[in-house]
Image (cartoon, rainbow, N blue to C red):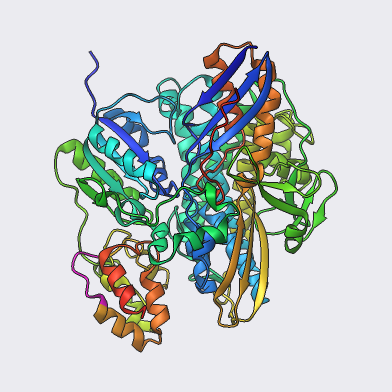
Amino acid sequence: MIVKTIKVDQLARVEGEGALKVVARDGVVQSAELNIFEPPRFFEAFLRDRMYSEAPDITARICGICPVAYQMSAIHAMENALGVVVDGPLRDLRRLLYCGEWIESHTLHVYMLHAPDFLGYAGAIEMARDHADIVRRGLNLKKAGNAIIALLGGREIHPINVRVGGFYRAPRRRELQPLAEELKRARDGALATVRWTSGFDFPDVARDYEFVALRGEREYPFNQGRIVSSRGLDIAAAEYDEHFEESHVEHSTALHAHIKARGAYLTGPLARYALNAASLSPIAREAARDAGLGPVCANPFRSIIVRSVEVLYACDEALRIIDDYQEPERPAVEIEPRVGTGYAATEAPRGMLYHRYRLNADGKIADARIVPPTSQNQPSIEEDLKTFANAWLDLPDDALRHRCEQTIRNHDPCISCATHFLRLDVDRGG
Amino acid sequence: MARIRPRLAVWKFASCDGCQLSLLDCEDELLEIAGEIEIAHFLEATRATVEGPYDLSLVEGSVTTAHDAARIQEVRKQSRFLITIGACATAGGIQALRNFADVREYAAIVYARLDYIQTLATSTAIADHVKVDFELRGCPISTRQLVETISAFLAGRKPQTPPHSVCVECKIAGNLCVMVGHGTPCLGPVTHAGCGALCPSYNRGCYGCYGPMETPNAPSLSAWLGKLGMDEDALKRVYRTFNANADAFREESERHDR
């Protein structure tokens, strides 16, 4: 029996600390594991007995790359518990803030974490030696996303200006105008990014994923929408726990999320695109068509194109919001604490993020549940590895190892986010 | 012949990655920095790694596992200078809230199989384990201060990161004092400068994410906050956030936890 084990002890160009291990016997992949050794940080535990108003700042610290996703999910869940609906310009500003995070996080992934795989570099800094203009275009695009977050949120990482009910301070119309100029340039850069990434050489693979994403009534989803899937699921966020479960699987100490009775599913750009492409703005729809994406893209390596299309959409949507913006009368609506349970799901750049809080009458948190996108995608990532690696087993070890790493990076895993991930005891597999 | 550039390594312990990201968020300076320094180990950015020793190590995150307690010793041995970046590395971070609780209870709230969990009862700063040459504060650190710190290292001088409180930054920014002006509780008087008085500039009280300033008088501030309506529990919580285990904040929170 020939046993072949491919291991990467520490994955590079992902957020957080992880490793992978693929075991093959007699030319067939037996197991594929994404090994996470991020230490547990216990967020759900220390949210207990904190005030509802503290959750946005605390949960932001789950992740430095997508803090807006945590803040928005916590805020919407709290407002759901407290019976508050925030609409009008404040809702638009939240969409604008999310545009900033998508641009910043997706661009970081496209240019600095993912593209070097396709072009044969160890990272973006090495890539810059041969393609300085391209890397500069990426940095400028990322900067435009950060500029939105810095203006609306105060700073790029762990913004300080959002609160349950709205904002501490709403921007004046004239403050947003310089952003519009930067975003017009960014939109051109984003269009160039779609064209650039669509020219990469992609392995010809696909999988029959169950895609799960939010779906808004008419808009591409950020903060709100029903949870829908490509196999017919259509529920409110409050019903998430009835349809999804997390389990402690034997080969991994990480919790994996599943759709009850069906199993693995995928959230993130591929899922959002498959379930919402019709809601993209015309410029983004056209770019997707020219990039050859079709109505559904099931090749995870091509997620880099979908991510680029979403950056283009976010630039375009941000410009629309800035153009239509009317200053609100007050930066936030009044909040009265009460007993209740609140639910929310929002679309973090790398996938759906679910929060649930139970509140006491004094506004303190009785319990909290947070299901990050990477926890939800982990079973699908492992299935990708198991499926695709079979076809690559003849590659030399280094090339195979790189392909496997790339397979994980396709899904932009955010490992620090995944509060449920634990150290894995590796099964040596014989 | 290529000139020899100082070797930089970036290390991660328990954290959110935000402070490392601050380096990648130096969009205008990143390529220039990469030209002056050899990025020898920075897994968030590149697969390429060069064996140590390193001239400068930036350490993000706190020590929360036995494995990490051993690993930081190795990092120290490999590093000529070691600088901690951010509240986790400098004060134990948000995960230091476990230091005030029973970590097994925490684990039981989050996880089903307690026997799988490998964690220490505490989250501690890097300086509790090894000698640290400089601490850069903030949750997250400021990119401006990070560039200053790296530049200072390159020039062989001490980084310019003022030790005064956020109040001074508020005066420089021309802000109305949120506490005096509209009665909003604010940790600015006891919090280390560095953010540029961000929260008060957005009509919000400072929540102390840069940790205690060098000579804070937290009991005096607590008396003022009490007059603004904060009860003992609120006072305890306000010092227990992202720098809960920094001495001055920990001691003051414990004074209100009786």
Q: Quadrant of the C terminus of chain A?
A: top right
Residue that protrudes farthest toward the left in the picture: B157
User: Eyeballing the image, is B5 above or below B100?
Assistant: above
Residue A201 in the image, given as x and y percentages of width and height? 63, 19
User: Is A56 in front, or is A333?
Assistant: A56
**Where residue B113 sits: x, y (%)?**
58, 51
Question: What residue span does the magenta drawing correspond to?
Answer: B213-218
In the image: residue B77, left or right of residue A7: left
- Using the image as rendered, state which of residue A324 and residue B54 is in the foreground: B54
Task: Answer whether residue A305 is visible to the viewer in this image.
Answer: yes
Image point (29%, 58%), residue name: B194
Left-right relation of A333 to B24: right
Magenta span contains residue A44 = no
Q: Quadrant of residue A216?
A: bottom right
- Whether residue B225 is situated above or below residue A70 in the rendered picture: below
Q: Nearer the viewer, residue A15 or B200?
A: A15
> Residue B96 sits in which quadrant?
bottom left
- Whether residue B29 is visible to the viewer of this picture, yes or no, is no
Query: Quarter of the image containing the N terminus of chain A?
Result: top right
In the rendered structure, the answer to whether residue B117 lies left or right of residue A230 reads left
The residue drawn where x is 41% and y is 40% is: B24
User: Chief secondary structure of the magenta span?
Assistant: loop
How many numbered badges does the structure rendering display?
Answer: 0
Q: Is residue A254 left or right of residue B36?
A: right
Please name the residue shown 57% across and 50% down the image: A420
- Residue A408 higher or lower than A272, as above or below: above
- At which x and y percent is residue A32? 63, 29
